[in-house]
Image (cartoon, rainbow, N blue to C red):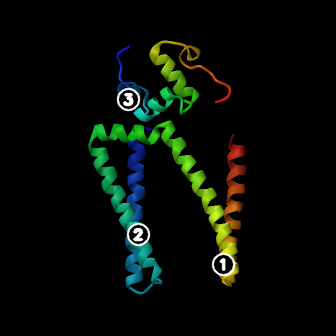
Amino acid sequence: MEFKKKMKINMIYYALLVVIGAALAVLQLTGYMPEVFLSFGCAYAACGLAMLIKNGRIMADPEKLKKFEIESTDERNIMIYNKAIRWSYLIFVYAAAAAIMILEFIGMKEAAVTVALTLCALFVLYIICYAVLKNKG
Amino acid sequence: MGITQDELARTLGVTRQTIIAVEKGTYCASLPLAHKIAAFFGESIENVFIFEEDK
């Protein structure tokens, strides 16, 4: 698919993000949602808006668009991106394991169980992703 | 050949940093990129890249 077309599709997603964010914020302000949804809504709307502005500026300038396309599709950049995800996953797992022990030690059993369950969910997700990717070839 | 890293990178559709990393040997180019580089210089892949088993 042409890169510009992909960016146009992304613009639709970002616009949707703004709409969802604004809707969540409005629903919270009118009392239909718990308080936490105001933060979520504002964050979604702000991120979506920022990405819309950024992509709009890039798409308006062919030189910038070419540069952005090269940076986004560059194989070394993709490798670095994947490596960063792998590293952050591993660091997260080690940090969570340490947190479980510390939380248990200071008597915060419920928090320790929550972190442990999150870690278990992450492992299950990893196994599912591994199986899917392996079968995909 | 009188070509800059930036021109080569633009022609191949990669960043200049990738070309620098390939030149330095800190990044192993993928087979499609190696093919593109070799084709750009009108050479075969074996003539452009030296395979070192320990890398």
Looking at the image, which residue is at 61% across and 62% down? A92
Between marks 3 and 1 in the image, the one whose residue lies nearer the viewer: 1
Residue A74 vs A47, above or below: the answer is above
Mark 3 vs mark 2: in front:
3
Q: Residue furthest bottom?
A: A31
The chain under label 2 reads A
Amino acid type shown at disc 1: Leu
Q: Chain of mark 1?
A: A
Seen from the viewer's position, the closer of residues A57 and B23 is B23
Spot occupied by residue B10 in the image (x, y as percentages of width and height): 38, 29
Q: Are marks 3 and 1 on the same chain?
A: no
Q: Dot 2 lies on which element? A: helix
Q: Measured from the top left, where is residue B27 in percent x and y?
A: 54, 33
* A115 sits left or right of A9 in the view: right
- What amino acid is labelled 2 in the image? Ala
Measuring 70% from the left and 79% from the top, which residue is drawn there?
A: A104
The residue beneath circle 1 is A103
Cα separation between marks 1 and 2 = 29 Å
Q: Residue at x 47, y 37 (%)?
A: A74
Residue visible at 36% across and 28% down in the picture: B6
Quote the CA–CA distance across marks 3 and 1: 52 Å
Height in image: A72 above or below B21? Answer: below
Whether residue A59 appears in this view of the structure is: yes
Q: Which mark is residue A43?
A: 2
Residue type, mark 3 in image: Arg
Dot 1, crowdedness within 10 Å: few (<14), some or many (≥20)? some
Q: Which residue is mark 3?
A: B10
Whole-percent x, y for residue A120 in the image: 71, 66
The picture places residue B20, in percent across and down from the top left corner, at 44, 30
Check the residue under mark 3 and report the chain it is in.
Answer: B
